[in-house]
Every structure is written in structure tokens, then in C-alpha cells.
Amino acid sequence: GAVVSQHPSRVICKSGTSVKIECRSLDFQATTMFWYRQFPKKSLMLMATSNEGSKATYEQGVEKDKFLINHASLTLSTLTVTSAHPEDSSFYICSAPDRLGIGYTFGSGTRLTVV
Amino acid sequence: GENVEQHPSTLSVQEGDSAVIKCTYSDSASNYFPWYKQELGKRPQLIIDIRSNVGEKKDQRIAVTLNKTAKHFSLHITETQPEDSAVYFCADSKGGGSNYKLTFGKGTLLTVNP
């Protein structure tokens, strides 16, 4: 139980285009979703926290107009990387508090490559 | 939490030896301390966690100790095997499974040599 499905797993896009990443909670309702970015050989850095029905909270230094987060329902949160640049190439991964209120469950991650 | 320091950044051991990874945290309100194992290109996998009301927890070859006074916690892996080779992250949170975020350490690359 407590599965978060993340899509796509890999995406290659051209500079200047936008890419949407989806995270769906399959067997529970996720009122909160955490979005992390991980550069090669680095740690997971929190980008923003999305809450169903309200605006996302962004961490310092993260451009909210570039990384659009939407949490329109209790089972879906999306991250859109707008006007992508090569430096946005990274591993993006979502996480939600599990339905038991014990820990966290992670999506499988999205490898974004901007060319 | 506010900040989590993790050491060492790399650790190489011989198969069968023990491995210890240490983390310190700064937020005194943190009360949930998980350890994750991450293989290349995969999601972090929870291997063990501990809450602030417990000083030690063990699961077969893996154990975690917590010293709240000193604000540090450690991962202990005994009888290491080559398949233990991966990157390990510690993290903290003000409330596991809640709307409080996880703050991760910088990770430790563990290599177990056959």
C-alpha cells in the first residue's frame, strides 16, 4: 500500500520547451506532496511542497514561475518545468506522507534531460 | 529539520566487516530519523527509521542509534555484503508521515569489496 506513481520516468526535451511530471497516489489520498531535485552524485534537495487546494510553498532559491506546481486533487500533483534549460537537467522525485502516517513514500523519479 | 550533516561521504569496507555512518542534526524539534538506501537512478528505499522516544532500533544486520542530547544518529551495518553497496542518506523530520518535510544529509557512497 501507499504507492506513488510518477510519470514519465525519463524525458528528453529541447531548450525552451516545457515538461510536465505527474505524481499520483494510487491507494491513498495525498494532501501533501514534496518535490525534490537530485543532481548526479548529490543529495535530494527539496524544491517545494504542494498542498491540495492551495498554493505550493517553495524553498528559498527555487523560482516558482519556472517550476509550476499544481495539486488539484487528493491523488494528483504535477510539476511543470517551464522554458527548460540544460541546467534543469536532473532527477526529479516526489514524495508524500504515507497513509499510515508513519513515514513517506516516494515516486520512482523522472530523469529530465534538456538538450 | 534545518540542517543535517552526514559523514563520511565515501566508505569502503571488506565483505563481512561492519560499516558505520553518522549524522548530526540541528533542529531540536526533529523527532523522526530515517535512513534510505539509493541505487543509481532509483528511488530512495527506507531501510530503517527511529523516532525520538527510542534510543536504538535493530533489524537483522541493520541498526540505528539516536542520541537526542548530542543531536546525532548513526547507521550500523554488520556483516556487510557486496549487495549493500549503494548510496545511503540520513534524513530528519519534525514528524514522520506528516506534512513536515524530510531534510536529507549529503549521502555516503558505501562500497563493499568482495
Image: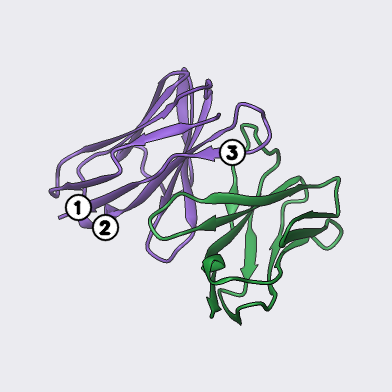
Chain colours: A purple, B green
Mark found first going from the N terminus, 1 or 2:
2
Amino acid type assigned to the residue bearing label 1 in the image: Val
Mark 3 or 2: the one toward you: 3
- Local SS, label 2: helix
The relative height of residue A114 versus residue A22 in the rendered view (above or below) is: below
The residue to which callout 1 is attached is A114
Mark found first going from the N terminus, 3 or 2:
2
Residue lying at 46% horizontally and 59% vertically, measured from the top left: B39
Mark 1 or 3: the one toward you: 3
| Residues beneath discs 1 and 2 located on the same chain | yes
Residue lying at 72% horizontally and 51% vertically, measured from the top left: B27
Per the model, the C-alpha gap separating discs 1 and 3 is 29 Å
Residue lying at 26% horizontally and 57% vertically, measured from the top left: A87
| Residues beneath discs 1 and 3 located on the same chain | yes
Mark found first going from the N terminus, 1 or 3:
3
Proximity of marks 1 and 2: CB atoms separated by less than 8 Å: yes
Residue B32 is situated, as x and y percent measured from the top left of the image, at 72, 45
Disc sitting over residue A104 in the figure: 3
The residue to which callout 2 is attached is A87
